Each structure stands twice: as C-alpha cells, then as structure tokens.
Amino acid sequence: MSLAKRRRREMRAAFLMIAPFVSVFALFFLYPTLKVVALSFTDAPLIGEGNWVGLANYAKLLGDRLFYTSITNNLYFVALTVVPTTVIALLIALSVSRLKGRMQALVLTLFFLPYVLPVSVVTMIWAWMFDFQFGILQPLIATITGKPVPVFKNPHWVMPMIAVVTIWWTNGFNVLLLIAGLRNIPADLYEAAALDGATPWQRFWRITWPLLWPITALVLTLQLILQLKLFDQVYLLSKGGPFNQSYVVLMQMYREAFQLNHGGYASAIAMVLFLFIVVLSVLQFQLLRIRGMRK
Amino acid sequence: MFESLQDKGHATGVHLRGARKSFGALEVIKGVDMDIGRGEFAVFVGPSGCGKSTLLRMIAGLEDTSDGSIAIGERDVTHEDPADRGVAMVFQSYALYPHLSVYENMAFSLRLAKRPKAEVDAKVREAAGILQLADHLEKKPAQLSGGQRQRVAIGRAIVRAPEVFLFDEPLSNLDAELRVQMRLELARLHKALGATMIYVTHDQVEAMTLADRIFVLQGGLVQQQGAPLDLYDDPSNRFVAGFIGSPSMNFLAATVESRNGSGIRARPVGQPDTAFDISLAAPPDAGTRVTLGIRPEHLVIRGDGLRVTVDVAEELGGVSYQHGTLEGGEPVIFQQTGVRHGMSGTVQTVAPEEGRIFVFDEGGGRIR
C-alpha cells in the first residue's frame, strides 16, 4: 500500500472516530453558541426572528441597575465560596490522607457523598434543616443570635447560607483532587525533610504547599468558574430575594429569556457573563501560575 | 581542600544491641548486635527482603525500634527524632525537593537550623566544588542527569557534616557505567571526609569494593561480618559463601567416605570416579552427608576430576565463565583465563585447586 493511500485511510478512520463527538458538539453546543451571539444583536423574542439592533442590548445592559446588583452578588458569592471551600477541602484532604486503608476510603466516601446528590435534593435537605419552624438548625442559630432566623428570607443571611449549602454539596470533589495531589508527593521527601530537621509545620509550608500548588491553583480556578455560574441553588432556595440580595446574573438572564420573552437581551447578558468568566478565570490561572513559578 | 566539611574528630561509631523490628506480627529484624567503628565504611548486603534497608532506616530514626537499643557514639538515640541523631541519609530515589534549586536543596537543612547566610553559602559552595556541581547550582533537579542528582543528594548530606552518613542503595538507579564511576567517587569521598558511613546494597560487587567491613544479612539476622576478603576467604556458612563472590560458588552434595585425624575423603553424589581429600580441624564421621563449595575461579582443567559438559561460555575477554553440568545434571561454573572460544559443547575434566574446598553441614553451617 502506498504511503499516500495509507495516510488517506488513517484520516478516514480518524474522522470516523471523532465524528460522533463532533456532530453532537456542533449541534448542541457550537450552533446554539453562535446563535446566542447572533441573537444578542437583535430584539428577538425567545422564539422567532427579530430585527438587527446592533449594540443596543449591550448599551441597555450598561445602564441596567439590576445587572450591577447581580454582578456584585456574583462576586460576593465568589468571595464566600472559592477560597473558603479550597481551604476546607485542603484541611479535610490533609486529615483524610493521614488515615489508612479502609478507614480512609470510608471517610473519603462520606465527604464525597453530597456531591452525588442532585441539586434539588440538596436544596430540599437544607431548606428543611433551616426551616423557620421545624428546622433542626434553628436552635443552633437561636443560641447564636438569640432568636430563630428565616435564613433564605433574610437579606444578610441569604448569600452566606447559600454559600454554606454550595460548599457542603461540592466540596467532596475538591477533596478528591487534593488527595490525589497529596498522594503524588513522594513519601521519601518527608523523610528527607525530617532528617534535615524540618518540623511538621515546616514540612507543610516548604514541601506540601509548594508541591501541591498546581492542584490548588486548578481547584481555585475550577471553583471560580463554577461559582460564577451560580443559578440552581438560588432559584430553588430564595428565587433571588429578598430585595434582590441573592439575585445573580444567570437569574437575570433566565428571567429576561423565559419570563419576559426578551431573547435578544437575555443573549447579551449571557455573552457578557461568558466573557466575564473567561477573562477572570484566565487572569486568575495565569496569576496563580506565575506565583507557582516564582517559588 | 574542603577543610570545613572535613571531619574534625566528631565522626562516631554506631552500636546496636539486640535491635529488633516488627511490623505487626511479622518480625523483620530479629535481634541485631553490631559495632561500627569511628570512620568506618560499613556495608549492609543481602538479598531483597533480608531487612538491610529496614535496619538502616532504624538507625536513621525513620522506623521505630521495637526492642533493643541504638547508640551513636556514646549517645543512646533509640527514641530520638531523626533530626537529632546527627545522621544524614542519601535515598535510593535521591528524594531531592523538586521545587527547589540545587543550591536550595543543599542549603535546606542549614537554613532550617537558621545558620548565618555566609556560613550556609560557604558550605554549599564547598560541597558543590567537591561534587562538581558548581555550574549547576541554579538548576532544578529535573534538569539534571541521574548522576548529577545523585551528587546533589550526597551534597545535601555532606553540608550538614553529620556524624554518620547513611546510604540506601544510592547507585541502583544509575546505569552500569555511571555506577562504577560513582562507586569510585564515594570511595574517594570517604577517604577525604573520614566520616563514618553505612551503606546498604544488594550488589555484592559494591559491597566488596567499598567496604571496610561487610555485614551480610539474611532473614533479619547478621549472618557474618568482616573485611571483604575475609568473607570471601573464610565464609562462616553456606549462605555467605554463595552470596559473596561472582559468579556464585558451586555447591555439590557429597558423602564423607572416610575420615582420619586431619581431614576427610569426600565423594560427590553421583561421581563414582571422583573423591577429594580435604583437611579439616574437626572432620565429621564417615557417612555424613555434606555440601562441598568450590568457587568457579578455583576449578582448573586437569586429567582427573569432575566431568563437565559445557553448554554456555560467557567470554569476557580477559576471563571466561564456562557454564555446564555434571553427568547427574548438577550445574557447575568454572573460570578460565587466557582461553578463547571453543569450549562450548565440549566435555572438560576439572578439579579444585589444593585447599580450596569449603565443607558445609546439612544445616548450611561451615565445617572447618
């Protein structure tokens, strides 16, 4: 068989193998994405064609006060979740990795369990636990604040509590990533450090922390992207209230698209959020990488 | 050269008394007594699983000692932390800190000890000079070759000027050529520093070439200790006899045919035409079953003796090793010097040189 012929055969086989993915990707991801970009320059309703309006949707967004509220709430939520969940996951991973054999597997499973639950079940569990009348957490809240608090209807409590629910729900995955990272650090480095006279504290800061940093940076970046896309928990627990205190960008997009039938405007919101996430996460990952390199 | 790193009389001996180590129900070190002298190069050698690495890690403090005691110099360190024992260790995997430069790797322990910057710098540069690492101080371990990484690991140990150096199979990750070269460098380093060194290896050539004293371990016990040539010339049991020397000693089952005041006449099993007269201080009774041990280099071609059918000849240039079998199928190796090809497929008659037969009893103990 000639070389050219063999190459052609290989190409055909390669194309056949990626075809299922490419077709599904093009149909359900690429096409809708391009459609959203196009839609954001029109005044189209959710279904049907609209007129080209240029950058009018984006101009309108710049003057939309609810959009600024949403962005602020998104950033507040990021501050409440990204770093705290990473720190908590790291502490759990460090403790779990000290356990041996079956005990380790068992404890790890317990921490991972919430992650397998669907969001509706998670919010149902926590809505009951925080229930104003019957919630088992209300006595605890009462001992701290002096009286029970309807947390998802209280403007100060709502975002922090959604953050708690989110961390509880998603932390297992971060623990898993960090444990994998910890396992990759050879044990003899700790032995060498022990012989070199490093205290446990020094062993953590001079060996574990710098060697785990690539994983930590990955966890931080994945968390940033995930938490900026906050929607389900808010929709199910507080509907964005009270007083828009938990209103977030995706919430606004959902309302514009599916409740107010503003397909074009909703697309513009989606585009802005998309760019926002891309810029922030790329920026963050680069910053973290530079920090890692300097070490 | 390297005055500040040279031993200033603080090298010390290492003394183990009834040292034992168990992992759960499994006892891997079954009561070891040893005295390693000041400035001595001691080598623990044995097959894998014999406990040699565990014993080294017990001395380092990386494994608890289940029973018995370990002293470094006058000091009982059995329950002390690794860092307080005054030992430095070179690991088989090198265990270099991958995120730190060569310089930082070597400076690590001194910086933890909060030594003055100038002193740290002087010591690191001096060690780098000895180990030919001066041009690589800013590199990360990943950018170095295997031999260079090994040198960094040694450098990290010598900047600490420990009382005792511990090496855990440090050369086994290197290729053959580099291993020979590093072996020489280690021997020079030991001479230059005059420090006490304990070295673990499964390679008896490393043991023979480096050691002042070899400890042969097997089954968690020291089988024999002594200078390399003493172990070669006078093994105290069959295990040591087979382990020291390359290729290994030939072993032949034999029966004592007769005894007299100064020795025995022993006939190998299945060899009606051959018997050897061996002089022994304490000859066993006639009829006793024994094992005869003869090194390949002590078998010479003669008119009478063992008839060996040679099937494979390993020709190394200067010497060749002839691998073959006796009529009963027992494998025999004999060494030839100055003989070129042509022995494979032939039958040769070989016999041991005078006084070069070791006799072992059925339990593997030596009969002298």
Image (cartoon, coloured by chain):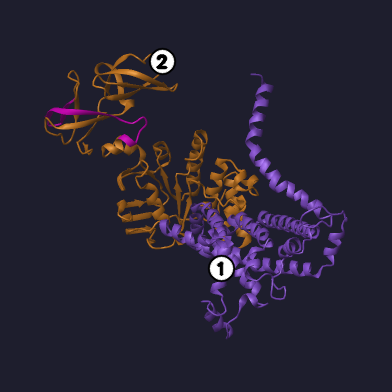
Chain colours: A purple, B orange
Task: Please state the extent of the stretch shown in magenta in the rendering.
Answer: B242-267
Q: Going 48% across and 57% down the picture, which residue do you hit?
A: A195
Q: Which chain carries label 1?
A: A
Q: How far apart are marks 2 and 1 (CA)?
A: 86 Å
Q: Mark 2 lies on which chain?
A: B
Q: How crowded is mark 2: few (under 14 residues within 10 Å), some or many (20 or more)?
A: few
Q: Name the residue under label 1.
A: A124
Q: In this view, does B13 lie to the left or right of A93?
A: left
Q: Where is residue B81 in the image (x, y as percent from the top left)?
A: 44, 62
Q: Name the residue under label 2.
A: B341
**Residue closest to the eye, A56 or A161:** A56
Q: Can residue A261 be seen in this view?
A: yes
* B250 falls in the magenta region: yes
Q: Going 31% across and 30% down the picture, which residue do you hit?
A: B249
Q: Where is residue B44 in the image (x, y as percent from the top left)?
A: 38, 45
Between disc 2 and disc 1, the foreground one is 1
**Tag 2–tag 1 contact (CB < 8 Å):** no
